[in-house]
Image (cartoon, rainbow, N blue to C red):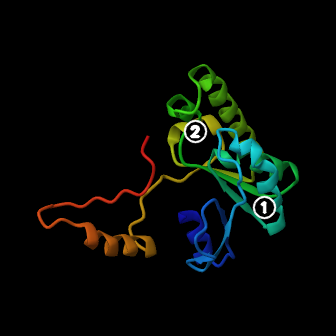
Amino acid sequence: HKEAWSLRQSGCMVTMLVADAPEASYLDMRVIKARTPFGSMLRPILNLPTLLRQALELRADLYLLYNPDTLAVGIVLALLGRRVVYDTAEDFSLRPFIHPTVPRPLASLVAGALESCERLLARWAVATCVTQRQIRARRGDCLLLENAPLTEGPIIEAADRLSTLIRRPDADLCLIYSGLVT
């Protein structure tokens, strides 16, 4: 969200391809529902042909890809000569060890495959953004975007409005976390 919104604010036309697209536009950005029929652990591979076709139909000047589900798409786009930026906000090679759907005996194999794919995409992408110093050390020439929280803008304004609905009068602090905790 932060990167797409920053690009839009700098004058770029932004189209977001997202799994859950309740609206056709968001903050003056076009939103398209990603056609991802498969939801299993193999979804990055099974959804590859559909997502790749959808991405190519957009004829983007630049593809900004985020998270390990897009690794295969990014690798193929880079092989096809498209300009790809890969952004990773966490060390996804650790996720198979804590994810309940990955059988324990396969966790090391899945983690190694993720690490190899991320390293390959980082090499072929025009840029790779990371949010953690230890990932930057493993990826080499990457842009470190420290993951500072949003402090202003429409998301913060909406959170402020919604917080008044759930704030308890006897509480000194109301914390709203939007994200995944594992």
Quarter that holds the N terminus: bottom right
**In-image side of 12 versus 177 (left or right):** right
* Label 1: how many Cα within 10 Å (few below 14, some 14–19, many 20+): some
The percent coordinates of residue 5 (x first, y second) are: 56, 71
The percent coordinates of residue 179 (x first, y second) are: 44, 53
Q: Which residue is mark 1?
A: 55
Q: Amino acid at mark 2?
A: Phe
Residue 40 is marked as none
Q: Residue at x 82, y 51 (%)?
A: 49
- Which one is in front, 101 or 139? 101
Kindly give the residue lying farthest to the top in the view shown. 105
- Which one is in front, 127 or 53? 53
Question: Does residue 164 lie above or below 149 as drawn?
Answer: below
The percent coordinates of residue 11 (x first, y second) are: 65, 79
Quarter that holds the C terminus: top left
**In-image side of 148 versus 144 (left or right):** left
Q: Amino acid at mark 1?
A: Ala
Q: Which residue is mark 2?
A: 92
Q: Quadrant of residue 82?
A: bottom right
Question: Does residue 143 lie above or below 91 as drawn?
Answer: below
Q: Quadrant of residue 92?
A: top right
Contact between marks 1 and 2 (CB within 8 A): the answer is no
**In-image side of 165 versus 35 (left or right):** left
Q: Residue at x 63, y 76 (%)?
A: 24
Mark 1 or mark 2: which comes first in sequence?
A: 1
